[in-house]
Image (spheres, rainbow, N blue to C red):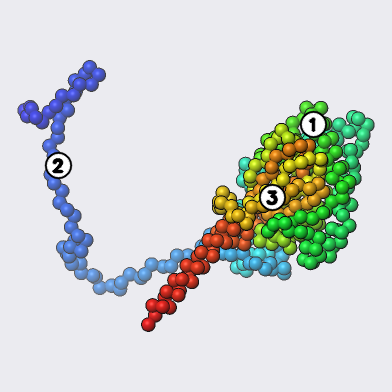
């Protein structure tokens, strides 16, 4: 029997006719009964005459690596020097972690984990060290930079060999002993190794900026001529030289580690910059400096100003090498953490300091600054960005940088004032 007309419809699709039959609506579903009511409606079950079942047995203790996967396992701050670590092979693993690192970290393991099998300890230590191992992209970038420097340095040395010159222009720069370039007064102050002896040779033209003589004029002249020699070689040999920083798109410059000065600069940082930074900049890891990026930049009238910026460093050493120029004064606008780098400048934070040939400036890398344009001549500066991997790791867990950031100091003072006011109000309301 055919359905009523209103129960069927016809739909046209791509030239064909399909009949769609409307199904009658389903019967309304009854609401589910509450769980308590369902239990009441169930028939009573008479228990047989036997003892109740025993409670379930406790789960077996975990074995193997799972036994040591505890959420609050912490490394010991003081190593156990009596513990003899296991052997973790002869070379680094796929993350680049050497056996010596595993053995050193094993002495910091808690006692219940120190006696575990070697693979279990390695598993746990890898989970800790993974946070400090560079990512694959960082390792590739580091490897590319290493290969670039080896290629440039090798080609630079071959160039001297072909010219029957078996040493660079100034071989004394490559002796790896920077003390031969240091002024006697500065050397005596550093050897004194006290805060009084270090600060006695410095002046502080503005808070956090220290100026002092450090290097002999002969060193400044030799370094400028060596850099010019390297840049002329690169141009004649058609060698592409990487720019020292991404900020400097004008002017001439080179990273000093590209042509063999890395070890000499390492000694300069470790023997001279670190002792000063330990005294002057302890709040940014001045006593844990472990790497640097050092370069020379030359600017002229046509190169414009060096814009307002902060350095990729904890401590910056800036040396004006020469030449004859006017203008190019440096200006500073206050120390800021990464959260407040674009905040405003207070009147007392703004000051200008001239670039004086032979003079050294030492300041926070996070001290916002820039350089005005050269009005005549050529300005050449050597800049050393000193870095602390320990402080950079600590920064990931810090939220208050009032030790050096002016804005954080203001916010902290405001919080303390609010707490003091609320506490006073509570005392006034007490009967």
Q: Is residue 56 above or below residue 320?
A: below
Callout 3 crowding tier (Cα within 10 Å): few <14, some 14–19, many ≥20: some
According to the image, label 2 marks what residue? 26
55, above or below 380, in the image: below
**Name of the residue lying farthest toward the top:** 15
Q: Residue at x 85, y 38 (%)?
A: 225
What crowding class fits label 1: few (fewer than 14 Cα within 10 Å), some (14-19), or many (20 or more)? some
Residue 289 seen in the figure: no
Gap in angstroms between the C-alphas marked 2 and 1: 86 Å
Answer left or right for 68 relative to 356.
left
Q: Does dot 1 land on a helix, a strand or a loop?
A: helix
Tell me the quarter of the picture where residue 136 sits. top right
Tell me the element at label 2: loop
Q: CA distance from mark 3 to mark 1?
A: 36 Å
In the picture shown, does residue 22 fall above or below 195?
above
Residue drawn at (90%, 29%) of the image: 162
N-terminal of the pair, mark 2 or mark 1, is: 2
Residue, x 38% and y 67% (percent of image)? 56
Could you tell me which secondary element the residue under label 3 belongs to?
strand
Q: Residues within 10 Å of mark 2 (few under 14, many from 20)?
A: few
Q: Which residue is mark 1?
A: 234
From the image, which quarter does the C terminus lie in?
bottom left
- Would you say residue 228 is visible in this rendering? yes
Residue depth check, mark 2 versus mark 1: number of the one nearer the observer: 1
Which residue is under mark 3?
Answer: 352
User: Horizontally, is 46 left or right of 71 in the view?
Assistant: left
x, y percentage for residue 179? Answer: 87, 54
Marks 3 and 2 sit apart, C-alpha to C-alpha, by 85 Å
Mark nearest the camera among 3 and 2 is 3
């Amino acid at each position: 029997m055919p359905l009523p007309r209103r129960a069927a419809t016809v739909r046209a699709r791509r030239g064909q006719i399909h009949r769609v039959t409307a199904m009658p609506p389903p019967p309304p579903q009854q609401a589910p009964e509450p769980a308590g009511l369902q239990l009441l409606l169930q028939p009573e079950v008479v228990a047989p005459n036997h003892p109740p079942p025993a409670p379930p047995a406790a789960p077996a203790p975990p074995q193997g690596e799972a036994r040591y996967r505890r959420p609050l396992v912490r490394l010991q701050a003081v190593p156990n020097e009596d513990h003899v670590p296991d052997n973790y092979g002869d070379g680094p693993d796929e993350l680049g972690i050497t056996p010596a690192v595993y053995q050193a970290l094993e002495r910091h393991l808690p006692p219940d984990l120190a006696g575990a099998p070697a693979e279990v300890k390695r598993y746990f230590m890898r989970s800790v060290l993974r946070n400090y191992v560079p990512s694959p992209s960082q390792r590739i970038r580091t490897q590319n930079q290493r290969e670039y420097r080896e290629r440039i340095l090798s080609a630079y040395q071959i160039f001297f060999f072909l010219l029957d010159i078996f040493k660079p222009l100034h071989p004394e720069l490559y002796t790896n002993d920077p003390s031969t370039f240091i002024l006697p007064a500065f050397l005596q102050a550093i050897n004194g190794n006290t805060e009084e002896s270090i600060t006695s040779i410095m002046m502080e033209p503005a808070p956090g900026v220290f100026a002092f003589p450090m290097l002999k004029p002969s060193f400044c002249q030799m370094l400028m001529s060596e850099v010019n020699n390297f840049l002329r070689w690169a141009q004649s040999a058609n060698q592409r030289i990487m720019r020292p920083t991404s900020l400097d798109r004008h002017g001439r410059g080179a990273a000093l580690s590209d042509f063999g000065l890395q070890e000499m600069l390492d000694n300069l940082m470790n023997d001279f910059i670190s002792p000063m930074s330990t005294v002057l900049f302890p709040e940014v890891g001045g006593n844990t400096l472990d790497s640097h990026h050092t370069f020379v930049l030359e600017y002229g009238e046509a190169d414009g100003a060096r814009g307002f910026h902060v350095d990729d460093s904890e401590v910056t050493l800036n040396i004006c090498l020469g030449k004859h120029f006017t203008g190019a004064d440096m200006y500073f606008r206050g120390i800021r953490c990464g959260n407040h780098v674009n905040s405003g400048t207070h009147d007392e934070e703004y000051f200008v300091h001239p670039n004086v040939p032979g003079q050294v400036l030492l300041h926070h890398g996070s001290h916002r600054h820039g350089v005005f344009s050269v009005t005549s001549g050529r300005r050449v500066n050597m800049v050393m960005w000193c870095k602390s991997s320990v402080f950079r790791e600590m920064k990931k867990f810090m939220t208050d940088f009032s030790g050096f950031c002016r804005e954080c100091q203001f916010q902290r003072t405001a919080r303390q004032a609010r707490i003091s006011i609320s506490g006073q109000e509570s005392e006034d309301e007490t009967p």
